[in-house]
């Protein structure tokens, strides 16, 4: 099976409600998202013209619409956080999630959003979301 990966970058601020550390305060990160996909049909021979499972430019459009535009240069907070700090609701760039915007939950949100719009002949194989240069969460498709 051939897999391809495209890497995306975005800036985002968040805070974690119910956390007793510094991340309970609004702060930002430079995120790096690795998106790995494969064709649902196995390829044991060379790929027919144009020779790829998807154009990287097309994959970029899909991921930008599903994930990057939702989070890039946004303040992402949970409904629970906003119930405690309602004044933050006035922020123009606010994106509200039902869950805490931890790197793990952002990764799960991204998985669901990408799977909804990925063309039928492609499957999402893995996601890796770096919150800092040395810390990331990873999701891998189950192998049955």
Image: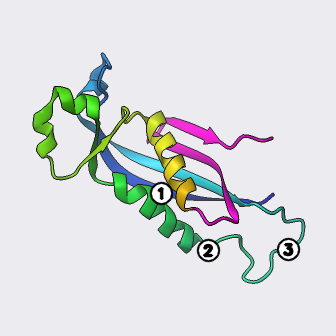
Label 2 vs label 1: CA separation? Answer: 15 Å
Residue 134 pos. (x, y %): 49, 35
Residue 53 pos. (x, y %): 71, 70
Q: Residue at x 15, y 41 (%)?
A: 89
Task: Please give the residue where the numbered disc 3 appears in the rendered image.
Answer: 46
Label 3 vs label 1: CA separation? Answer: 28 Å
Q: Main secondary structure of the magenta part?
A: strand
How many discs appear?
3
Task: Please give the residue where the numbered disc 1 appears in the rendered image.
Answer: 8
Which label was assigned to residue 55?
Answer: 2
Q: Residue lying at the far right in this picture: please name it.
A: 44
In this orientation, does residue 118 appear?
A: yes
In the picture, measured across the screen, residue 51 lies left or right of residue 35, that is right
Quadrant of the rendering where the N terminus is positioned: bottom right
Q: Residue at x 54, y 47 (%)?
A: 111
Residue 27 pos. (x, y %): 26, 36
Relative height, residue 124 to residue 55 (above, below): above
Label 2 vs label 3: CA separation? Answer: 16 Å
Quadrant of the rendering where the C terminus is positioned: top right
Residue 51 is drawn in which quadrant? bottom right
Q: Residue at x 55, y 72 (%)?
A: 58
In the picture, measured across the screen, residue 118 lies left or right of residue 63, that is right
Residue 100 is drawn in which quadrant? top left
Q: Nearer the viewer, residue 10 or 48?
A: 48
In this orientation, does residue 132 appear?
A: no
Q: Which residues are magenta?
A: 118-144
């Amino acid at each position: 099976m051939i897999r391809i990966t495209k890497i995306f970058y975005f800036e985002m601020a968040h805070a974690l409600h119910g956390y007793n550390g510094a991340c309970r305060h609004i702060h930002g990160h430079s995120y790096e998202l690795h998106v790995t996909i494969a064709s649902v049909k196995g390829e044991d021979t060379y790929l027919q013209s144009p020779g790829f499972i998807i154009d990287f430019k097309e994959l970029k459009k899909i991921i930008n619409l599903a994930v990057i535009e939702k989070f890039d240069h946004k303040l992402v907070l949970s409904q629970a956080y906003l119930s405690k700090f309602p004044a933050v609701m006035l922020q123009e760039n606010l994106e509200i999630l039902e869950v805490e915007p931890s790197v793990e939950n952002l990764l799960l949100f991204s998985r669901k959003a990408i799977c909804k719009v990925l063309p039928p002949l492609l499957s999402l194989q893995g996601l890796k979301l770096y919150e800092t240069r040395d810390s990331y969460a990873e999701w891998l498709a189950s192998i049955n």
